[in-house]
Amino acid sequence: MAKVSSEQLGSEPIGRLLVKQAVPASIGILVMSLNILIDSIFVGNWIGSIAIAAINVVLPVSFFIGALGMAIGVGGSSIISRALGDHNKEKALKTFGNQITLTLLVTITMVVFGLMFIETLIPAFGGKGTIYDPAKTYYTIVLYGVPFLALCMMGNTVVRAEGKPKFAMIAMIIPSVGNLLMDYIFIYVFDWGMAGAAWATTIGYFLCFAYIFYFFLSSDSEMKIGWHHLRLNGILVKEIGALGFVTLARQAVVSITYLIMNNILFNLGGEPMVAVYAIIGRMLMFALFPVFGVTQGFLPIAGFNYGAKKYQRVRESINTAIKYAAFMATMVFVGLMLFPEAITSLFLSDRISMSTHELETKAFVLKNAPNAMRWVFAATPIIALQLIGAAYFQAIGKAIPALLLTLSRQGFFFIPLVLILPNFLGELGVWLSFPISDLLATLVTGYFLRREVNRELKIEPSI
């Protein structure tokens, strides 16, 4: 398999390099997002719309624990990229070993606590009424597989830091395909309902872990660690934690957002309104896959060249990534504005035999979701600057500005808006909070990114 080595991150033309990094990342994110999307379609058609709402309730908890692995992965991978750019291989290996140890310690602890407080967490995240029982079934099974998900997320970022995006892409495709296959067997063939959906997801996590484990044992990986690399190093742990906290905080805010949204929408319209947000939530994960792919491709390029002090290449990578991501975001925007009704209908069952409650829920969702979707994605064309700008600070190891800019959209703007606007505008206030927070966060990020580039990337030193 043709692959990009870490040294090529500092030599190939930026445009070509970004395509090599971003296309596999985008494909991987697309397949993973399609997995979530099709999984929701399967669940909606084979179990019911309440089941989609139940999964949406569980996602914040399982994703947060899985995000611990991603946080450790992204934080450590920033160090690895810069260490490889600076030709410090031993530091890269020590960082990877510390990432593995931290991921195991933290996620297993969180799973234990997640199971201990199951009766409190599910209702707190909106698992009320008819949603509670299916949500509890799904949550209990999926939580056992979350440590595998965390290891996958951690390992995947390290694969990218090595400059091997195609392997990272495969790591994202395998669990998605496995999950969908298991969905068909467990839900459609065996009729296991929510338990079948949960076991399909858990097996998908394990398949991803098995592939990542195989990759690091193979000759394709540069990260050949020994047992001594697993011993925690205080300085590295502190740096991994500081940078990883940016990702963790972002995921934590996502979980808090789900909690707030599910409760606000439940109070506004009950289970049907939560089902509307469940569909929109899936599209927020799925539709922006090319933009997130460009962001993922940008991170190792910026980090490696910053570590190598090739500042002109860093500048070029920022500008190119923003242009590519903005183009992709605009294409997504056009599609969502034109076809929200068709998209919504994909998630809803066409079964002839449905209860009165299911029929009422379906009618409500068909009526309300398309308009809500248009408002939620109204500012999509401008989000590229916000995503790339926040990612840049993380790539170069500046944890505090990376944290503040990452939290700006949902933490500083969206959550206050969604708590305030519905009091005056009702349901519309919920959906308007999305584009307003996108606009404000983009303006703030653009200001700080421009200032940072003008201050720190003025001269590329001669070597």
Image (tube, rainbow, N blue to C red):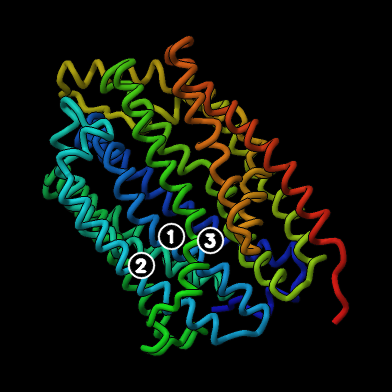
Q: CA distance from mark 2 to mark 3?
A: 15 Å
Tell me the residue that label 3 is attached to. Answer: 243
Please tell me in which quadrant of the rendered image residue 386 appears.
Answer: top right
Q: CA distance from mark 3 to mark 1?
A: 11 Å
Q: Which residue is situated farthest in the top direction here? A: 424
Q: CA distance from mark 2 to mark 1?
A: 9 Å
Tell me the residue that label 1 is attached to. Answer: 70
Looking at the image, residue 450 sits to the left or right of residue 43; the answer is right
Asked if residue 243 is positioned above or below residue 124 in the image, the reply reads below
Tell me the residue that label 2 is attached to. Answer: 103
Looking at the image, residue 404 sits to the left or right of residue 18; the answer is left
Work out which quarter of the rendered image holds the C terminus and state it: bottom right
| Amino acid type for the residue under numbered disc 1 | Met
Q: Residues within 10 Å of mark 3 (few under 14, many from 20)?
A: many
Residue drawn where x is 27% and y is 29% of the image = 349
Q: In the depicted view, which residue is nearer to us: 239 or 361? A: 239
Q: Residues within 10 Å of mark 1 (few under 14, many from 20)?
A: many
Looking at the rendered structure, the secondary structure element under dot 3 is helix
